[in-house]
Image: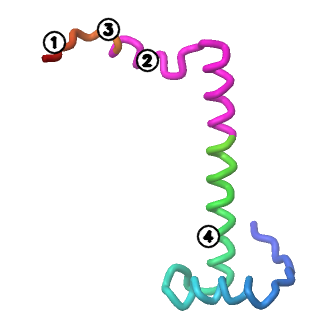
C-alpha cells in the first residue's frame, strides 16, 4: 500500500531532487524522495545496531560469541 503526501520544498531542495534525476540516480522526483527515505531508514537501523553494540560492550558481553573461538587459534611467532 502506498500513501500520497504533499510536501513543500524550497528551491534548493527541489534543485537537489532534480539533480538526482538529471544525473541518473533516480528516474523521477518521487524515486529520488523514496531513495532518500531508504537511506534515512538505513541510518536509523545502523544507529539502533550501534546502540546495541555499545550496550553489550558496556556490560562486557560478547558481541559475536560465535567468533570467540577464533581468538584462541594458534598464531605464528612474530619476528
Q: Element at badge 4?
A: helix
| Residue 18, above or below 57 | below
Q: Label 2 belongs to which residue? A: 66
Q: Marks 3 and 1, how far apart in space?
A: 14 Å
Query: Mark 1 and mark 3 in contact (Cβ < 8 Å)?
Result: no
> Does label 2 or label 4 sit earlier along the sequence?
4
| Residue 31, above or below 58 | below
Q: Which mark is residue 6?
A: none
Q: Marks 3 and 2, how far apart in space?
A: 12 Å
Query: Mark 2 and mark 1 in contact (Cβ < 8 Å)?
Result: no
| Residue 52 point in image, percent of width and height | 66, 29
> Does label 3 or label 2 sit earlier along the sequence?
2
Q: Quadrant of residue 50?
A: top right
Q: Quadrant of residue 54?
A: top right
Q: Which residue occupies 67% across, 55% down?
A: 41
Q: Residues within 10 Å of mark 4 (few under 14, many from 20)?
A: some
Q: Foreground: 34 or 57? A: 57
> Does label 4 or label 1 sit earlier along the sequence?
4
Q: Which mark is residue 35?
A: 4
Q: Foreground: 37 or 75? A: 75
**Of helix, strand and loop, which mostly describes the magenta segment?**
helix
| Residue 38 point in image, percent of width and height | 64, 62
- Closer to the eye: label 4 or 3: 3
Amino acid at each position: 500500500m502506498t500513501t500520497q503526501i504533499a510536501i513543500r520544498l524550497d528551491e534548493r531542495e527541489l534543485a537537489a531532487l532534480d539533480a538526482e534525476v538529471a544525473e541518473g540516480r533516480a528516474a523521477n522526483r518521487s524515486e529520488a524522495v523514496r531513495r532518500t527515505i531508504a537511506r534515512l531508514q538505513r541510518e536509523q537501523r545502523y544507529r539502533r545496531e550501534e546502540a546495541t553494540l555499545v550496550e553489550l560492550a558496556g556490560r562486557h558481553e560478547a558481541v559475536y560469541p560465535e567468533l570467540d573461538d577464533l581468538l584462541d587459534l594458534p598464531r605464528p611467532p612474530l619476528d
